[in-house]
Amino acid sequence: MSVYSKQQKTERQTVMTAHKPKFGTFIRERRTAKGYSLRRFAELVGISPTYLSHVEQDKVDSPPTVDRIKKMAELLGESADELSAMAGRVPEDLPKIIQSQPEAMPALLRAAKGLTPEQLKRLQDQASQMRREGDPS
Amino acid sequence: MSVYSKQQKTERQTVMTAHKPKFGTFIRERRTAKGYSLRRFAELVGISPTYLSHVEQDKVDSPPTVDRIKKMAELLGESADELSAMAGRVPEDLPKIIQSQPEAMPALLRAAKGLTPEQLKRLQDQASQMRREGDPS
DNA sequence: TTTGCTGTTTACTGTACACGGACATAACCG
DNA sequence: CGGTTATGTCCGTGTACAGTAAACAGCAAA
């Protein structure tokens, strides 16, 4: 470690250590419940059996990328958003949405921080309605 | 490339190629406008002059990490969110917010997709008001 | 007891994100 | 004019992340 790199890899690390139900453990539980062998499931997801084994044992420092997580979710009948959160990652379509309005989207998220699921649902409904109404300018 | 790795590094790549105003070019313009030398600015940001030079020439495949971008924004008097978007990255506090409500937050963002800045502002205000009202359950 | 599955371990690979030292160029000062 | 100092750049190197490959051990059926 040199004189630079004073505040490196902070975000990912802290996020990663935060997945409570253990991503790998959860995947293994669901995979076996679905009757997939490790090799078979790895093949369907598009990763190596080796890597899947490591992931399911939580032996990897950072979980798979979002596209693989999405594949897993589809095969297991789970929510991709839920799995992504468990893995400490952001669902793949969200960055583009955020960057399309670099000021307003982050501001909205920060304002929505801490709200209950019910409150968030109401917000979501209002957003949908705005879209139906069209641009009011 | 082996039999696996069929759909690798999709997200980052596509996002990266999307920064229109060229992140590096923009940084250089703002830095020189502020009268910082490359070495001085690099020192303040906490990166090496070499690396900064590469970044400003857009010679790097992917721009700096969010924490360094944030530092740059502060020094240059620019919006960290704006710079992050330009670099194809998500502001560092957002992943945690999203993951705190893995279903509702992505749903909200998707519903808000395509709305105008004015509409988003209205949503944001409503969110702020909800928070003041507290949990209605 | 071999075959054929299961999952696991050790070692290796390629790319992203960065650092360090040597370098060329221009400005400044005596 | 020559030497010093500050500018930015090129080339090589290092490390972490996201994986792969080959070889392995355990077990069940033929």
Image (tube, coloured by chain):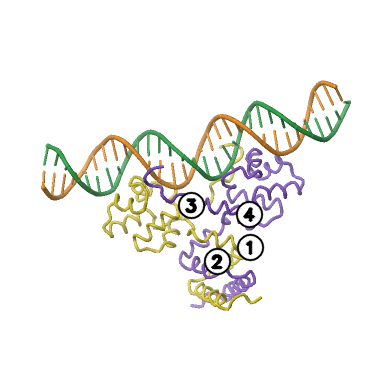
Chain colours: A yellow, B purple, C green, D orange
Nearer mark to the viewer, of 4 and 1? 4
Marked residue nearer the N-terminal end (1 or 2): 1
Nearer mark to the viewer, of 2 and 4? 4
Q: Amino acid at mark 3?
A: Thr
Q: Position of residue B124 (x, y in %)?
A: 60, 71
According to the picture, the residue beneath numbered tag 4 turns out to be B20
Q: Amino acid at mark 1?
A: Glu
Q: Is residue C9 above or below residue B80?
A: above
Alpha-carbon neighbours of circle 4 within 10 Å: few (<14), some, or many (≥20)? few
Q: Disc 4 sits on a residue from what chain?
A: B
According to the picture, the residue beneath numbered tag 3 turns out to be B10
Nearer mark to the viewer, of 2 and 3? 3
Q: Are marks 3 and 4 on the same chain?
A: yes
Q: Is residue C15 above or below residue A72?
A: above
Q: Nearer the viewer, residue A133 or B97?
A: A133
Question: Helix or strand or loop: what does disc 1 sit on?
Answer: loop
According to the picture, the residue beneath numbered tag 1 turns out to be A103
Q: CA distance from mark 2 to mark 4?
A: 30 Å
Label pair 3/1, CB-CB below 8 angstroms: no
Q: Are marks 2 and 3 on the same chain?
A: no
Question: Helix or strand or loop: what does disc 3 sit on?
Answer: helix
Q: CA distance from mark 4 to mark 1?
A: 17 Å
Q: Are marks 1 and 2 on the same chain?
A: yes
Q: Residue at x 71, y 54 (%)?
A: B77
